[in-house]
Amino acid sequence: MKRILVISDTHGDLALAQEVIRVSVPLDGVIHLGDLVQDARSLERTCGLTFWKVAGNNDRYEDAPRELLIRLEDVSIYSCHGDLYDFHPHHPARERKRSMRILVDRANRQGAQCALFAHTHQAFCERQGALLVMNPGTLSPAEKDPGYGLLTIEAGRVRGAVHRAGGRRTVGTLIRGVLRRFRREAAAAPGRKGAS
């Protein structure tokens, strides 16, 4: 059995992503669906897990692929950011359905059992026929409903679910976080009384 974390749209804020990784272990890897690929690289260096990455619309100068087919335990997972298929949360339902049809068709032509996309910042997970389709949402804490996805792969089958990761940070929680970090750094500073 493999457990894969699916995240996206961290937009430079790694604290929530680090917390989600911490509470989700054990994991066999992480799929980051873009925006920002450099965040995925930073997380990969610090957490020691395997990362698969695709570039998003804000990753123009990154060398990551725009789409990726990942094979794990006889399951193929098609991954992209979502802007490739013109997914936008404010488009009319007819346009969103068209984008979904194109994504599902592309994943099916690739032989995938799962299709992952992002870009809209809206978590979503459902079956389209035999294909599991997931958007993990965003892990940007500035958003109202940050979220992430978990895939479980076992015996050639894939299951998935999306989860909430907390809500918007208030000014008070931001200030408390900065003060905690300042106190830790001050306590660890060389030459400080009581520091070793």
Image (cartoon, rainbow, N blue to C red):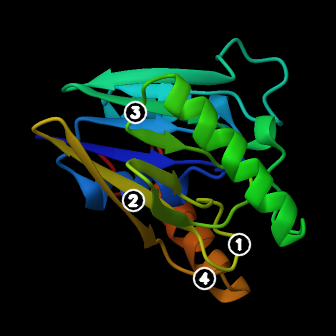
Whole-percent x and y of residue 181? 53, 62
Alpha carbon separation for disc pair 2 and 1: 15 Å
Name which of mark 3 and mark 1 comes first in the sequence. 3
Name which of mark 3 and mark 4 comes first in the sequence. 3
SS at badge 3? helix
Whole-percent x and y of residue 124? 55, 65
Q: Is residue 164 left or right of residue 38?
A: left
Whether residues under marks 2 and 3 lie with C-beta atoms below 8 angstroms apart, the answer is no
Q: Which mark is residue 46?
A: 3
Q: Which mark is residue 173?
A: 4
Whether residues under marks 3 and 4 lie with C-beta atoms below 8 angstroms apart, the answer is no
Q: Amino acid at mark 1?
A: Glu
Whole-percent x and y of residue 161? 36, 64
Q: Is residue 38 left or right of residue 20?
A: right
Task: Residue at 78%, 60% (x, y): give it.
Answer: 96
Q: Which mark is residue 143?
A: 1
Assess disc 3: are there few (<14), some (14-19) or many (≥20) residues with their C-alpha within 10 Å of its C-alpha: few
Residue 137 seen in the figure = yes
Identify the residue under disc 2.
20
SS at badge 2? helix
Alpha carbon separation for disc pair 4 and 1: 15 Å
Q: Quadrant of the N terminus?
A: top left
SS at badge 4? helix
Whole-percent x and y of residue 39? 61, 36
